Image: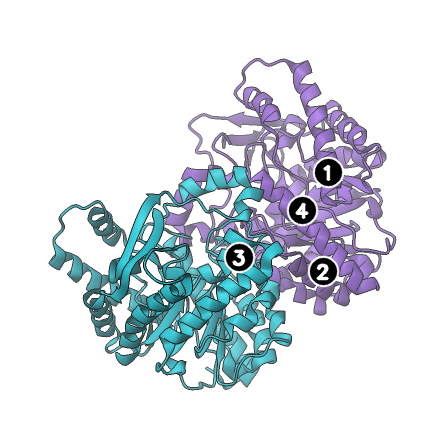
Chain colours: A cyan, B purple
Amino acid sequence: MPRDADRILTTHVGSLVRPPKIVEYVDAMERGLAVDQAAFDELLQQSIDEVVRRQQQAGIDIVSDGEFGKFRSWNFYVLARLGGIEERAIVESQGGSRDRQLFPEFYAEYFPTQKLPKRGTVYTVGPVKYTGQAALKKDIDIFKKSLKGVDVEGFLPVVAPASAVPMFKNEYYKNEEEAIFAVAEALREEYKTIVDSGLYVQIDDAFLPYVYDLSFGSADLEGFRKWAQVRVDALNHALQGIPEEKVRYHICWGSFNTPHVGDVPLRDIVDLVTQVKAGAYCIEMGNPRHEHEWRVWETAKLPAGRKLVPGVISHSTNVVEHPELVAERLVRLAKIVGRENVLGGTDCGFAQSPHVRRVHPSIQWAKLEALAEGARIASRELWGRKAA
Amino acid sequence: MAKDAGRILTSHVGSLVRPDDLLAFIAKQQDGQPYDAKAYEDCLRRSVADVVKKQVGAGVDIVSDGEYGKSISWSRYILDRLSGFEERHDKTPGFKSAVAGKDRRDFAEFYEEYEANYGFVGMGKTFKTGSWFVTGPIKYTGQALIQRDIDDIKRGVAGSGATDAFMPLVAPASVVPQRTDEFYKSEEEALFAIADAVHEEYKAVIDAGLIAQIDDAFLASVYDVMVPPKTLAEYRKWAELRIEALNHALKGLPQDRTRYHICWGSWNGPHTNDVAFKDIADLVLRVNVGGYSLEMANPRHEHEWRVWETVKLPEGKYLLPGLVSHATNIVEHPELVAERIVRLAKLVGRERVVASTDCGFAQGPFARRVHPQIMWAKLRALAEGARIATKELWH
């Protein structure tokens, strides 16, 4: 992560609400209609130019491309960039967790309103290869062009092995472990290309915690940890040779505005998370299911040289966080892990797919502005009056 | 309320999501269609008894009737119980929104979408917004209705295991503040007439052995409508008169059986122009009640627990902090609830904190801030958090 500043820097998790014109194109392409590719590319460049500027204006120090170039969703975009896999039995997304069993009537009302992408089961059917070079190059080129002449740094969010193929079935490799390492090996190309281009890479891994509620639950924490350990090992395999300080790792418990009563406690997985060879960890602390977990860091050890990017803004309410609350959240964590080790972040993205919109865009920007204002207040408190 | 109970007691702000069978009756009432009045009264009584039982089951100590007996909304129900008001649907421009303030101007596109989906500030699509006029002397005429509500909750509470029970009632300032007065000489005169009228309701509730909770969302939320262009000082002057009227309404009523709820409007909006609690804390504390119920769970007001580092809570008074929010479907972790209780208890004293919610879950019969399954999960989380905090504070 960036060299030490004498203040709390700000960033977020990556996805931002797409402009309606982009959604129109994405929609057409997803339905298999022919579109003017050059016109779309031009629109994409303009839109990313604009969203980079807008983030800077809001006071964000390390900005993203809003994930505007990604199709389907924050994780399933990658299926079009991998060879050796097949997706079968594609169905509407419903959320399949214990949370859903506890609140069935709520889920029945809520999910149909969410415009989530359909999803299927991924099968490994041959050697897994990275085939997304052209799409990735386009993402990087557009984003870097947008960053020119703007005084901010950029990060590009991409998917972790565990979240690229969360519930996959292996039909090719000797066993599941070998398959997940092959996926990791392929994804290394994506990670490395991004870092080689000078950008930060953010590895998104919502499924790592989420699979606990989906498939294991509190009765089988050990089984879940075994499942997760293989994924963490695979991710570290993918990150081999990539400088830690250019990598950040994001986990969340699924960005749905749902009860989340079955989420795995951070304290039960924090040791796994900090095994990931990343310079920073972006972790939810802005919503009321995980807000209290700042205290985990009273006992958990943050490895030397690594930073925390706590979510101090939540997308699960329209109420805009008060900057003083943002500051309080940053300061109490900074007092535990050191002010130089904390950046201000969000719980998750604001638009996990081109069609998803966790809050109205006007609220998204107000929340990012509150984040920046809160970081300024926290900086004054932590460094004294002179801080910016 | 409340001698030291030896633990953190729990309550909430009052309104709860209505059951479907009760709503079917209320829909007919509001549409002016015929319905079986006796069957409605039976359904209401059963529903109140049921919701009391459910609250006790969720771990709520001081329960309400869910406001099931109220029509229209938490504030406008009073129009069934006062003389002197008249609703007109003529050419007079009705107010489109209770939040026609800065927040609405700053987030106009959001509010347009929100109200298209959830109705008038989330009150449900059937909520009507006619214009109200004062056309004669304002007197309390709701004796039969309040007696019915009292009877229903007392019957529900008997043998339920509830520690105590409260009835939410509207404050003078929140009685249709957007009204045209064609009768009284001054705003002040009208306000004090309203205060005299609602006094009767407060007294009936307390005389029946219940706690009267005075709801005053308008007190805080009117700031956003007035400022700017008006100033904080002008708003405070507006609020001071309302608080005088409220204290007039509370005259002679025992402080230990009254509590006062303010909030900044319960719609799930940005709330970026809410008045800071520190700017009105002194006014709120002037209200002659025992308990103060304040939002502290949603992210616009969560940080305001710190106001109590400098503001002194007068002797004999207690706080009902909001520890769970209706503005998200995510259920508060009990450890977060406990953390919020403990940090406040350390400032004002453990015996002066009653765990509560930011606001009601259904400010009108057709409002539903969260799905009822989530509402109950949040109340259970509140009770569990109070148990954790009790362990930390007493043992």
Of mark 1 and mark 4, the one earlier in the sequence is 1
The answer to whether the residues at label 4 and label 2 have Cβ atoms under 8 Å apart is no
* Badge 4 element: helix
Could you say which is closer to the camera, residue B300 or residue B231? B300
Of mark 4 and mark 2, the one earlier in the sequence is 2
Tell me how far mark 1 sits from mark 2, CA to CA.
Answer: 21 Å
Residue beneath label 2, please? B341
Query: What mark, if any, has residue B293 been given in the picture?
Result: none
Residue type, label 1: Ser
* Badge 1 element: loop
The reply to whether residue A320 is visible in this rendering is no
Tell me how far mark 3 sits from mark 2, CA to CA.
Answer: 30 Å
Q: Quadrant of residue B137?
A: top right
Residue beneath label 3, please? A212
In this rendering, the answer to whether A141 lies above or below A46 is below
Residue beneath label 1, please? B64
Residue type, label 3: Tyr
Q: Position of residue A87 (x, y in %)?
A: 30, 51
Q: Quadrant of residue A190?
A: bottom left
Residue type, label 2: Ile
* Badge 3 element: helix
State which quarter of the image contains the N terminus of chain A. bottom left
Of mark 1 and mark 2, the one earlier in the sequence is 1
Residue beneath label 4, please? B379
The answer to whether the residues at label 3 and label 4 have Cβ atoms under 8 Å apart is no
